[in-house]
Image (cartoon, rainbow, N blue to C red):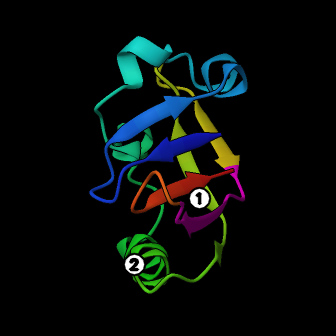
Amino acid sequence: MVITDPTGSIEYVNPKFTEITGYSLAEALGKSPCILKSGHTPPEVHERLWQAITAGKEWRGEILNRKKNGELFGEGPRSRRLSTRRAASRIFWR
């Protein structure tokens, strides 16, 4: 799981993210989820993802990402914008 601020900067990753990607919380903080981009997912997929999120909608799809060690891995994340009284808006990736 990854939580980003409205600009896409990572604020939190859970231990499973670290286990799968090889990036620690400290390495991921402040970075964009683009650190995982492999170059194998068409740009249109990323565009549709961000369009859905910025419109406040849930997004589901398939993305081929790259681990810190360079190994590729596929995932079918769900992403959505969360709003709370304490935080104006956060993006939740699972």
- Give SS at disc 1: strand
- The percent position of residue 35, horizontal first and vertical second, equals 36, 37
Q: Which mark is residue 33?
A: none
- The percent position of residue 73, horizontal first and vertical second, equals 65, 39
Q: Amino acid at mark 1?
A: Ile
**Quadrant in which the N terminus is drawn:** top right
Taking 86 as reference, is 28 above or below it? above
Q: Amino acid at mark 2?
A: Thr
Residue furthest to the front in view is 85
Q: Which residue is mark 2?
A: 54
Magenta stretch, main secondary structure class: strand
- The percent position of residue 63, horizontal first and vertical second, equals 59, 59
Give yes or no for residue 93 being in the magenta stretch: no
Q: Which of 47/85 is in front? A: 85
Give yes or no for residue 76 being in the magenta stretch: yes
Task: Describe residue 82's horizontal placement relative to residue 62 as left or right.
Answer: left
User: Over which residues does the magenta segment extend?
Assistant: 75-84
Q: Which residue is mark 1?
A: 63
Q: CA distance from mark 1 to mark 2?
A: 19 Å
Residue at left 72%, top 25%?
Answer: 16
- The percent position of residue 84, horizontal first and vertical second, equals 54, 60
- Give SS at disc 2: helix
Task: Describe residue 60's horizontal placement relative to residue 42 as left or right.
Answer: right
